[in-house]
Image: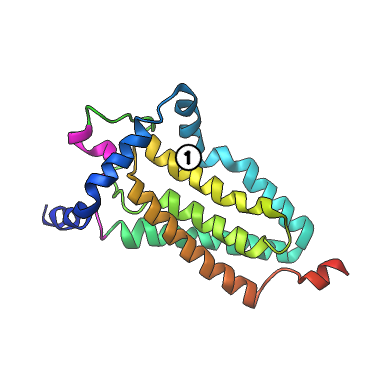
Amino acid sequence: MLLLQITSSLFSPIAAVDRKLFFLVNNGMASSFFDGLMPLAREANTWIPLYLFMLVFVTINFGKRGWLWMLFAICTVALCDLVSSHLIKEHIFRLRPCQDPALAHQIRILANYCPRSSSFTSSHATNHFGMAMFVVTTLRTYTSRWIYLFFAWAALVCLAQVYVGVHYPFDVISGGLLGCLLGYIIAIFFNNYAGLLSLQQKTT
């Protein structure tokens, strides 16, 4: 109880704005289209074709270095999940909107279940923005501007987390920023010490 009181005070300065933004998404955006789209957008199985495409893309274009890229990509997600789900959530507890009795009569819960873990930070946001940042930072030299759509992909997943009622906007924004930082660090490490083919090597 004491820990809950202490951590609750950490979010009190932004709580009012955060709730308004939450209801703007959870209630204000409500439609049958989004009710069907958003629960799917947050499910990992939905994006299996994208993951397979990336596997094929890097292995065809970069061979053995493509497999190394995949290893670093997996490490990026693993690190993001470790930091968000364990280092942060186990020490900073915030009640999820779908677990808050005070919001029970106002909230729309579209998720299959409401986790009892801390709402801060959103691990979905951390993992997906971490992956997006890693992909963009390591592959933008070799691709067209479409690569930046990975940020839109991550943003859609984050929006879905708020829409279905399992996170506040501040949770996903913080998670997204954390993911970008971790993804960028690993990407820079990869580019400097492993890397894919240089442009000169690629064209010869």
Residue 88 percent across, percent down from the top left? 32, 60
Q: Does residue 183 belong to the magenta stretch?
A: no
Tell me, yes or no, if residue 9 can be seen here: yes
The local secondary structure at tag 1 comes to loop
Residue drawn 55% across and 47% down?
152
63 left or right, relative to 204: left
Residue drawn 28% across and 40% down?
20
Residue 90 percent across, percent down from the top left? 28, 58
Residue 183 percent across, percent down from the top left? 52, 63
176 left or right, relative to 74: left
The residue sitting at the top extreme is 32
Q: Does residue 93 belong to the magenta stretch?
A: yes
Tell me, yes or no, if residue 114 can be seen here: no
Q: Quadrant of residue 186?
A: bottom right
Q: Which residue is mark 1?
A: 42
The residue sitting at the bottom extreme is 193
Residue drawn 67% across and 46% down?
52
Residue drawn 21% across and 54% down?
13
149 left or right, relative to 179: right
Specify the segment rendered in magenta: 91-103
Three-letter amino acid code of the residue under disc 1: Arg
